[in-house]
Amino acid sequence: MHAVLVSVYLLLVTPITLTWWAAGSQLVMDPRTICKKTKRLRGKMAEICSKQALVDQIRLGVELGQRECQYQFRFRRWNCTSSRKSIRKVLLRDTRETGFVNAVLAAGVTYQVTRACTTGELLGCSCDRKMKSKKNKKRLKMASMPEGDWEWEACGGENIDFGLKKSKDFLDTRYKKRSDMKTLVKLHNYVAGRMAIKNHMRTECKCHGLSGSCTLKTCWRKMPPFREVGNRLKERFDGAVKVIAGNDGQSFMPEDSSIKPPGKTGLVYSEESPHFCLPNNTLGSFGTQGRTCVETSPGEEGCSILCCGRGSRSHDETEEKNCKCKFLWCCEVKCEKCNETRTISTCL
Ligand SMILES: *[C@@H]1O[C@H](CO)[C@@H](O)[C@H](O)[C@H]1NC(C)=O
Ligand SMILES: *[C@@H]1O[C@H](CO)[C@@H](O)[C@H](O)[C@H]1NC(C)=O
Ligand SMILES: *[C@@H]1O[C@H](CO)[C@@H](O)[C@H](O)[C@H]1NC(C)=O
């Protein structure tokens, strides 16, 4: 937790760390510089640049994506470090890690911009008023509809369409004219990242009426918590499909022809990941020496995997904690201090 906080802090105080995030990163690092350049480019980017509030939210969305990446990869050999050099190296490739980072970034921007609409922090967008029309009930899967009689709130909920569009304008637009393998994979993973929110919108309702009687029920659409989005993308990462170029030069297909083509929501990649066991500048790898691991776990956090077979070392760490707390009438809590010892393993 501490390490995460520290890295978030570093992110906030050293904007330079933000350069790496994908190509759109420069905008993120210093919107003004990029937007000066973009004036000549016109188009979607110029449109984004003309709205400082939107630029700010996009930057926050990128940070949201990065924090989630660090959380989801906290036990992996490559832990989505905040080192910009490392991330840049990973983003230059086309591995599963690249795919995850791109997807979680697209999702982060979508999420942040949508949230900002809802809370009224962005001009030019607000809650989803279209929901009010009856037809729109059809837009939702029946399974996610509340039971009984109800109405949409005047503001039908979070305006995901606006967030999706801005994420796309910001990230995808510059690649639209390219169809090389890496670009196709990147665009696919951006879409998958956004789908992890769009396909999992939920409906929440509230009862109105005397003492909680439900004479009127109103409902609205809401995004899932971002942690859930991250968890879902991590599952997609674990099941990512390796692809090769299709014959038409405009598409890709699974390398293993017995695997069914990935749907829109799946992550894809075209290059095997390095093992990230040893430090290697070219790969953006710090190696795993000194990383904390879990002695008996068979998973990615287990010492056997994380330490790449080099073994681990254990030491005890003692921490003074509150314990044997008593509630004293009224109103005080008295605790004693106890020493709590934990065994920590780190990779050799
Ligand atoms: C990520 O890995 C690096 C290098 O291996 C390590 O220094 C850092 O503490 C790790 N970060 C987190 C959040 O675990
Ligand atoms: C780093 O990785 C590259 C690419 O896999 C490899 O060619 C190179 O030999 C590695 N360098 C070291 C010092 O291991
Ligand atoms: C906890 O350990 C420290 C250092 O060994 C010691 O100074 C302290 O008295 C211990 N506290 C308790 C409550 O045992």
Image (cartoon, grey):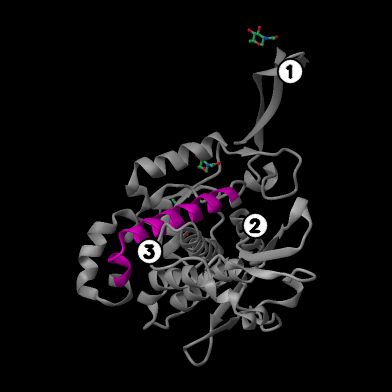
Label 1 or label 3, whichever comes before in sequence order: 3
Q: Is residue 37 left or right of residue 278?
A: left
In the picture, the quarter occupied by the C terminus is top right
Residue for point 45% across, 52% down = 63
Report the amino acid beneath label 3: Leu
| Measured Cα–Cα span from mark 1 to mark 3 | 51 Å
**Helix, strand or loop status at disc 1:** strand
Residue range in magenta is 47-71
Indicate the position of residue 167 as horizontal and vertical percent values.
45, 68
- Against 71, residue 327 (above or below) is above
In the picture, the quarter occupied by the N terminus is top right
Residue 16 visible somewhere in the drawing: yes
**Helix, strand or loop status at disc 3:** loop
User: Would you say the magenta stretch is mainly helix, strand or loop?
Assistant: helix
| Measured Cα–Cα span from mark 3 to mark 2 | 28 Å
Is the Cβ of the residue at disc 2 closer than 8 Å to that at disc 1? no
Ligand 1 within 8 Å, label 2 CB: no
- Against 312, residue 207 (above or below) is below
Kindly identify which residue carries mark 1: 323
Kindly identify which residue carries mark 3: 123
Count of labels in the image: 3
Q: Nearer the viewer, mark 1 or mark 3?
A: 3
Q: Nearer the viewer, residue 18 or 161?
A: 161
Say which mark, if any, is on residue 228: 2
